[in-house]
Amino acid sequence: MSAMAAIALAPEKIPSVRDKVSPEEWQTRVDLAACYRLIDHYDMSDLTGTHISARVPGEKDAFLINPYGLFFDEITASSLVKLDIDGNVLSESEYPVNAAGYTIHSAVHAVRHDVNCALHTHTRAGMAISALKCGLLPITQHSARFIDNIGYHDYEGVATNLDERERLQRDLGDHCALILRNHGLMTCGSTVPHAFRLIAKLEKACQAQVDGMAAGTKVTEIVPTVQENTKKHFAQREVLSAQRDWPGLLRQLDRIDPSYKN
């Protein structure tokens, strides 16, 4: 990134695009900006690293992603950059897009049309689990929702090689989550609230597993019959639970800093 590119508009000076986009796109922008703020608030951000994307309603193969250079607690609805699957920038922005972010998120949105939000993190616990051969174990209620619903993708270096998209698609399959080996976590939701709820639960599951394994004793896995019943329970309720929690999360953000809606 050049020195000139680094001198971009401060987030509070980025002009509003509310009158330039459809009401549906604007709502998605507000929800996605809120998601970025929540990831930071719940200590799941990594400076300017990682990324969250959301499909633009009514526009084929267009999605929104963060401007590369803003911290997650600075993201606003108007600052988000709109791309297509081919990497063409469809909105004005003084900020570039993270190349690895484009690779990972275009891979998801190109083939998973049921996914409207993909969320990637580099958390301490998530990276730790990603480096363990055992992966995520069914040892907590939080991890139970990911039984048979999580993929694993081997590390290939920083994800700037577009050829990696095919392998990301293969390893994600039709799952709601992906562990990027030696790297981090990703969740895929039907909505922005759904993807956020999934990452919050996956992160807690990883934290609990790291803590439990650190005790140096054997862990107890959920018995197979209970695993199956619990998996089905969460599959039926997860989206509704996300919708239930989202208004409260937005109220929380509004108390802290409502500028995500700008």
Image: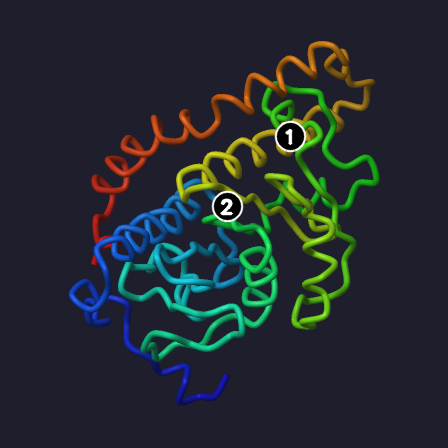
Would you say the residues marked 2 and 1 are in contact, meaning their CB atoms lie under 8 Å apart?
no
Observer-nearest of 118 and 55: 55
Q: CA distance from mark 2 to mark 1?
A: 19 Å
Query: Looking at the figure, which quarter contains the C terminus?
Result: bottom left
| Residue type marked 1 | Phe
Q: Is residue 6 left or right of residue 118?
A: left
Tell me which residue sits at (20%, 69%) in the image: 20
- Mark with earlier residue (2, 1): 2
Quadrant housing residue 12: bottom left
The mark found on residue 8 in the picture is none
To which residue does mark 1 refer?
146
Q: Nearer the viewer, mark 2 or mark 1?
A: 1
Q: Is residue 228 left or right of residue 197?
A: right
Q: Is residue 39 above or below residue 25?
A: above
To which residue does mark 2 refer?
44
Q: Is residue 159 above or below residue 129?
A: below
